[in-house]
Image: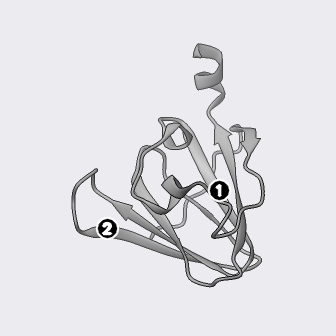
Amino acid sequence: MQHIIIPPNYIHTRSTPFWTKETAPASIWRRHLDAGTRQGVYPRLSVMRGVIRYYGYADETSPEILETLTINAGEFGVFPPEKWHNIEALTDDTVFCVDFYVDPEILIAG
């Protein structure tokens, strides 16, 4: 997966709690396209412990995985806006959170 940089003028709008395999919403483990990945929104997933793998897809039903990104403890990964995806915890002790960065123009228009 290509390295994604959040534009420097984007604004941090929210953070999830620290999640584990057991406490994260079940929907995060299934393929989804949610409000957090709409146009102009970049999610940044940070792993505190364990390992997370991101899978990106062309659309809602395509079986082919187009992109993968492995995020180890102490690292973060930025996902593209408007991309069907799911994540997988590769270790039982995984702890992670997600921060969302939004285009200021989207906030003004919203």
Question: In the displayed structure, would residue 9 be above or below residue 90?
Answer: above
- Residue at 21% x, 59% y is 62
Residue 107 percent coordinates (x, y): 64, 22
Query: Label 2: how many residues lie within 10 Å, few (<14), some (14-19) or many (20+)?
Result: few
Dot placed on the residue nearer the N-terminal end, 1 or 2: 1
For the residues bearing labels 1 and 2, Cβ distance under 8 angstroms? no
Gap in angstroms between the C-alphas marked 1 and 2: 19 Å
Amino acid type indicated by mark 2: Leu
Q: Is residue 61 left or right of residue 72?
A: left
Residue 25 percent coordinates (x, y): 59, 54
Q: Secondary structure at mark 2?
A: strand
Amino acid type indicated by mark 1: Arg
Which of the numbered marks, if any, corresponds to residue 44?
1
Q: In the image shown, does 94 or 11 lie closer to the viewer? A: 94
Residue 77 percent coordinates (x, y): 61, 65
Question: In the displayed structure, would residue 45 be above or below residue 11?
Answer: below
Circle 2 sits on which residue?
66
Question: In the displayed structure, would residue 38 be above or below residue 64?
Answer: above
